[in-house]
Amino acid sequence: MVRLLQLGALGLALSGVSAAVALPQTDDGTAGKPKPPACKGLTKRQEWRNMKRSDQKAYVKAVRCVMTSPAKLPKLKALGAKTRWDELVMLHQVEALQIHSTGTFLPFHRYFLHVQQFLLGECGYKGGLPWWNEPLDSGNFLSSPLLDPVTGFGGDGTGAGNCVNGPFDGLTVSIGPGFNNQPRCVNRKINDFFSPLTNQTYVDDALSKPDYATAWLAIYMGPHLWGHVALAMMDGNSITSPGDPLFFTHHGFVDKMWWDWQAGNLPARLSDISGPNAMSPEIGFIEFDGGIADEAASQGWGSPSPAMLAITPDPKNGDNGGTETTLDHVMSSLGIIPDATVRDVMDIKGGYLCYEYV
Ligand SMILES: [Cu+2]
């Protein structure tokens, strides 16, 4: 936590990061590529408290089903995934050092929610993913309806392991913390000292940015980061926080921020992408001091094993040899669903994706 308080100084470093990032050409390079089919109806992603109780129950039931369904992918099972949910968390773990602090942060996490939607579909769920309108609860996450043990995701963690009560009580996640894999309960520790930093002022600040290079940083370092700090999901661990189902409502909020920003200038912002395509070992996670090696030690993450590195995709795949994230950047789910490009996910109504936030 002490390290997080050093973020004031980090803001200065960040302005250097964004200044160094050039905007891409707007030519989207789609010539010769098949267009995705048009959407035949949009899935509605509703704020949790606006969902019908029966839809909330169906969602929770499907999440529990994914969390208790056996893992399927041999290469992920070999690395310790026991359930389908573990495979999802492992995807975020294996690629953690290329999907954070990079231009693909927002596209990848949009794709990641799409992967979750696919897995819920295996368990019969056909509804939209819920999202959490965090500004409604900023400063008072503890009283949020999303943390209700009966009609939400369970409350604040308790006991030595900070295990949650509610619908995910008693379930085990075997991936994490960090690059270590130890079975644990679903856990979180709410801190309402930090939750005010997810409020509307910070959302509006991010939405006011003129280009992707500044918008993704404002989202990443603003409400995205502070929501994570305030929730401390799965040991507060940046690498494996998706073990807690609440992660996906937080990232629905994050994805909606990006979409709301994109929708502020269509169609131009459907092709505005930039940012480094790989995490610099010297900088590491931009929200922490030090490079990757220092952070691995100070955060207790450990390092990816050789077996993990063997299945980690090239973070520059599709970027034509450059260091900048492009629309052709390839995102992989390690075989859960087919790979996709950044271009595929730029438009949430573009055909590859078909949903809207309501
Ligand atoms: Cu992430």
Image (spheres, rainbow, N blue to C red):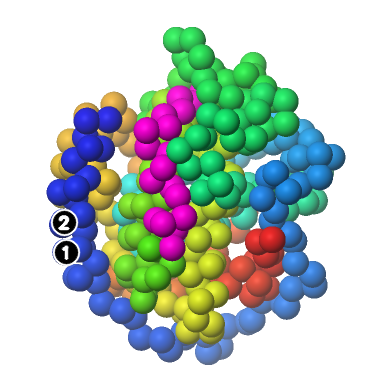
Q: Is residue 259 visible?
A: yes
Alpha carbon separation for disc pair 1 and 2: 5 Å
The magenta region covers 187-204
Q: Quadrant of residue 339?
A: bottom right
The residue pinned by badge 2 equals: 13
The three-letter code of the residue at mark 2 reads Ala
Q: Residue at x 59, y 35 (%)?
A: 144
Residue type at numbered disc 1: Gly
Q: Residue furthest right?
A: 54
In the shown orientation, is residue 287 left or right of residue 269?
Answer: left
Rendering quarter of residue 105: bottom left
Horizontally, residue 150 falls left or right of residue 174, namely right
Q: In the rendered image, is residue 318 in sight?
A: no
- Magenta stretch holds residue 285: no
Q: Is residue 275 above or below residue 59?
A: below
User: Is there CB contact under 8 Å for labels 1 and 2?
Assistant: yes
| Quarter of the image that includes the C terminus | bottom right
Q: Farthest residue toward the top?
A: 159
Under circle 1, the secondary element is: helix
Quarter containing the N terminus:
top left
**Residue underneath mark 1:** 16
Placement of 103 over or under 136, stated as above or below? below
Residue at figure coordinates x 43%, y 89% from the top left: 27
Please name the residue shown 64% across and 81% down the image: 35
Q: Which secondary structure lies at badge 2?
A: helix
Give whichever of 139, 336 is nearer the camera.
139
Q: At x 81% / y 45%, what residue is drawn?
A: 52
Relative image position of residue 310 (x, y in whole percent): 38, 44
